[in-house]
Structures are given as C-alpha cells and as structure tokens.
Amino acid sequence: MGGNAILQPGQEATYANQLANVRRSCSVLARLAGQGHRLVITHGNGPQVGNLLRQQEEAQAEVPPLPLDVCTAQSQGFIGFMIQQLLRNELAKGGHGHSVVSLITRVEVAADDPAFGNPSKPIGSFYTEEEAKRLMTAKGWQLKPDANRGWRRVVPSPRPQAIVEADVVRQLLELNQIVIACGGGGIPVVRQEDGSYTGIEAVIDKDFSSFRLAREIQADVLLILTDVEHVYADYGRPEQRPLTSLTPSGAAEYMEAGHFSQGSMRPKVEAAASFAARGGTAIICSLDRADLALSGLAGTRIVPETAEAASYHQ
Ligand code: ADP
Ligand code: MG
C-alpha cells in the first residue's frame, strides 16, 4: 500500500485523518482476504517518519533525539497498529476469523552499496543554509538545497538484499495469519563480520523491499496499490494512455524512454518487472480496484515474457 492509503496529499497528519484513510484501505484488504487470498501487507511511511523525525528535532532540548532507524521502527509499529486494528475489525464484520499481526521488519543492505557514497533521499524538516551548515558539522549529516524550500537532510537509499524476518513471515502465513511487514521499506541493517546486524540511518524504497519479500516468501502475485488506476505511457500529456499489460522487456523499453518518474512510478515498474522476470505476476493499480485487478479487470499487469511461463503461474 502506498502512502495515500494512510494519508492523502495535503491532508493534515492527524491521527483521525490517518485512521479514516486506513479504515477505507482495510475494507479493500478485508474483501481480498474474504475471497480467500492470503495476504502479506507492506506499506509506505514517508510523511509519518518525516513527522517523527521532526518531533525528535523540536523536542531535543527536553528529550534526546532517536536516530532514523529507530524512527522507522516506530512508524512500522504505529502504522502496523492502525492496520492491524482496523483490518481485524473489518474481517470480524464479514465473519472472517483470520488474525492480523504486524512485524517490525529489518532489511539487509550491502555495506558497500553505491548509495552510501551518494545520499539522495530527502527526509525531515527544511532548514536555512546557516542551520544546514551547522547541522552538517554538529551531527555529521548531509544536507542539500531542496527546490527553493530550503535545505534538507538527505540519506542514502540502498537496495534491499534480504528480508531478515522472511522466515518468520512464512511461518506466520502457515498459521493463517495476515502479516504486515516491511513497513516504510523496512529498517535498513548491515551485517557485520561476526554475523550480527547493525541498524543504519538510511531509507529503503518500499517498492523494492516489497518485491524482495514477495520473492522470498514465493508469493504468486505482487500487488502494488497506489493512487492511479494504471501505469501510463506519456503520463500527464494529452497523448497519455493506460498500459494494461507489460512484460519485463516491454517495461524496460518504456522505462528507458523515460515514461516513469524516478521517485514515484519507476521503482514500482522496476519491482514489478523484476518479479515477472522470475515467473510471478505483478499488478500495479489503484487501491479501490484491487479485487478487480486481481481478476484481470483493472490495473496494469506485468507478466513473464513467455506465454508458457505465464500460464504456469496462473
Ligand atoms: P506511492 O505512495 O503509492 O508509492 P507515488 O506517489 O510514489 O505513490 O507513485 C504514484 C504516482 O506516480 C502517481 O500518483 C503518479 O503521479 C506518478 N506517476 C509518474 N509517472 C507515472 C506513469 N507513467 N503512470 C502512472 N503514474 C505515474
Ligand atoms: Mg512512492
């Protein structure tokens, strides 16, 4: 589920607003569970973790600030709680007995990921140039000017290598639980030489982590629910047209031709194409049409290259 499932652009980030959005999203998910689909839910956390970071900064004279990996864990707990509660309520209405569990999920990234040399993901508050320079020295943060709105902290966005809790997700599925995992892309951790993990201050793209998790649990379908009904060619132009079906190579052609924006649709198409390239079916569609899309009646499907591979996985 994309960020819109939790907070719509322009809405104030009150708990009531977020609950109302999550309630709507959960009624869709409950319908899918009611149809017999076994769900693992992943979700975004952009505005939520941004606000948690701001709270750390604003309150630091009174309470020591917590690092980004901890804020990501907090956002997983807070959003997971909302989904867990509201999805369970929706399921109960329909007489369904599944339980719902949210899992604080760590995602392993490579210590030598090139992203660490080029922090690119803006997070948290905006600062003046003067404040930005002070923070760079005082905290060792990297800050960059952000489109006329001031300076902003940037963190690396490394690629997910493995979902540390994938086994637990699998075991919970076996117990017929609905699992919420990899919130906000997961908490990035690096594996040390002795086999232990350390949390790091970075963010992982949730579309990439969702692909990785889907693959590790051998999901049949990777369903990417967002706020547009399809992936479009020439998006936002008069000649815009919906793409209803793509193969990984077709997706790559559109990608190279620049049809998908870097920070939004592109990671989804990349994740979907990677999933299809390994034999699965990926669907990108709007949240409210999830069940239609699963039946092949809405959204954009990304399917394996060959018809044989496609029918094998149906
Ligand atoms: P999410 O929170 O679900 O990850 P994003 O905002 O990151 O949502 O991505 C969805 C957005 O991608 C859409 O609202 C749309 O504005 C944008 N977008 C960019 N290129 C395309 C495209 N080619 N087709 C559809 N949407 C696109
Ligand atoms: Mg996004």
Image (cartoon, rainbow, N blue to C red):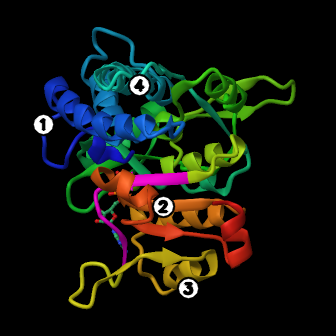
Q: Mark 2 points at which residue?
A: 283
Q: Mark 1 points at which residue?
A: 12
Callout 4: SS? helix
Q: Are marks 3 and 1 in contact (CB under 8 Å)?
A: no
Q: Do the residues labelled 2 and 3 touch (CB within 8 Å)?
A: no
Q: Mark 3 points at which residue?
A: 253
Callout 3: SS? helix
Residue drawn at x 42%, y 74% as measured from the top left: 260
| Overall secondary structure of the magenta section | strand
Placement of the N terminus among the 4 image quadrants: top left
Callout 1: SS? loop
Q: Distance between the residues labelled 3 and 1?
A: 39 Å
Determine the quadrant in which ligand 2 lies.
bottom left
Q: Residues within 10 Å of mark 4 (few under 14, many from 20)?
A: many
User: Where are the magenta residues, as a range?
Assistant: 222-232
Chain-order first, disc 4 or disc 1: 1
Q: Name the residue under label 4.
A: 80
Residue drawn at x 59%, y 61% as measured from the top left: 281
Q: Which of 74 and 123 is in front in this view?
A: 74
Q: How crowded is mark 3: few (under 14 residues within 10 Å), some or many (20 or more)?
A: few
Residue 239, given in percent of the width and then of the height, sits at: 26, 91
> In the image, is residue 238 part of the stretch drawn in magenta?
no
Disc assigned to residue 37: none
Q: Distance between the residues labelled 2 and 3?
A: 18 Å
Residue 63, given in percent of the width and then of the height, sits at: 33, 9
**In this rendering, position of residue 32 left or right of residue 7:** right
**In this rendering, position of residue 193 left or right of residue 237:** right
Q: Are marks 4 and 1 in contact (CB under 8 Å)?
A: no
